[in-house]
């Protein structure tokens, strides 16, 4: 479990394909503190650390993960949002995030608005993937509040701190982002379906 509060932004320093898998080596300020077998969110995708060397760590994304996320499009030098799993007994500053990306979305608008930014994303709505006005949405692992929610569009406002301390600053029109919809909303939708 994660909170969607990004701890560090890492830089992809190596990518290796191995059949259907992609091995990503990431350099970051938290890499040296990680341990093998630890779960770490990379752009909102829960991946297991398989190696730690100095200020880098390596994780592996399998084919299924690559099909559902933007990890397969990463290039050397790209930034990834990183978050270690939450500790029981600590504050939940974002929202409950599983690290299980539901789908990718596409950025359709980026507007600078007097010191903050307004991003609008297009996604494929399904009965389980709900966006509600003022509800939680996780974009590339970052917990955000959705508004202007429509059938297949929603917007988020980004404050300067979030813009500077996550990889949202790299998102342009046409960029693919990882989306994880609110788990509570998914459970409510499933319960309504069973009635």
Image: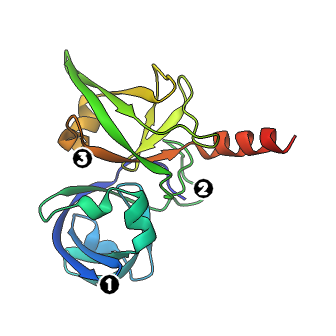
- Which class describes the residues within 10 Å of circle 1: few (<14), some (14-19), or many (20+)? few
Q: Quadrant of residue 81?
A: bottom left
- Answer with left or right where residue 100 lies relative to residue 15: right
Name the element at disc 1.
loop
Is 181 positioned to the left or the right of 109 in the image? right
Question: At 32% across and 56% down in the image, what residue appears?
Answer: 70
Report if the CB atoms under discs 1 and 3 are less than 8 Å apart.
no
User: Farthest residue in the right direction?
Assistant: 195
Residue 10 image offset from top left, x and y in percent: 22, 60
Which residue matches tag 1?
Answer: 19
How far is mark 1 from mark 3, CA to CA? 28 Å
Q: Which residue is mark 2?
A: 89
Would residue 5 be found to the left or right of residue 190 on screen?
left
Q: Nearer the viewer, residue 25 or 165?
A: 25
Q: Is residue 32 above or below residue 113?
A: below
Image quadrant in which the N terminus is located:
bottom right
Q: Which mark is residue 149?
A: none
Q: Which residue is mark 3?
A: 167
Q: Earlier in the sequence, mark 1 or mark 3?
A: 1
Quarter of the figure that contains the C terminus? top right
Q: Nearer the viewer, residue 105 or 146?
A: 105
Q: How is the image coloured?
A: rainbow
Vertical placement of 161 versus 117: above or below? below
The residue located at (21%, 65%) in the rendering is 28
Q: Nearer the viewer, mark 1 or mark 3?
A: 1
x then y, percent, for residue 74: 22, 61
- Residue at 43% from the left image edge and 66% from the top image edge: 65
Of residues 117 and 17, the one nearer the viewer is: 17
Instruction: Please report whichever mark, 3 or 2, sits nearer to the chain's N-terminal start.
Output: 2
- Which mark is first along the chain, 1 or 2? 1
């Amino acid at each position: 479990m994660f909170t969607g509060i990004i701890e560090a932004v890492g830089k992809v320093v190596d990518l290796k394909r191995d059949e259907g898998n992609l091995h990503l080596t990431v350099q970051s300020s938290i890499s040296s503190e990680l341990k093998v077998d630890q779960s770490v969110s990379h752009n909102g995708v829960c991946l297991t650390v398989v190696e730690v060397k100095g200020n880098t760590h390596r994780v592996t994304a399998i084919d299924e993960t690559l099909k559902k996320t933007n990890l397969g499009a990463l290039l050397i030098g790209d930034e990834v949002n990183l978050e270690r799993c939450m500790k029981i007994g600590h504050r939940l500053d974002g929202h409950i995030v599983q690290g299980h990306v539901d789908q990718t979305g596409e950025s359709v608008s980026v507007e600078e608005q007097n010191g903050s930014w307004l991003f609008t994303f297009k996604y494929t709505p399904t009965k389980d993937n709900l966006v509600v006005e003022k509800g939680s949405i996780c974009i590339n692992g970052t917990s955000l509040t959705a508004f202007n929610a429509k059938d297949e569009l929603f917007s988020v406002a980004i404050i300067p701190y979030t813009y500077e301390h996550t990889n949202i600053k790299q998102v342009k029109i046409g960029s693919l982002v990882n989306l994880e919809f609110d788990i509570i909303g998914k459970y409510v939708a499933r319960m309504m379906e069973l009635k």
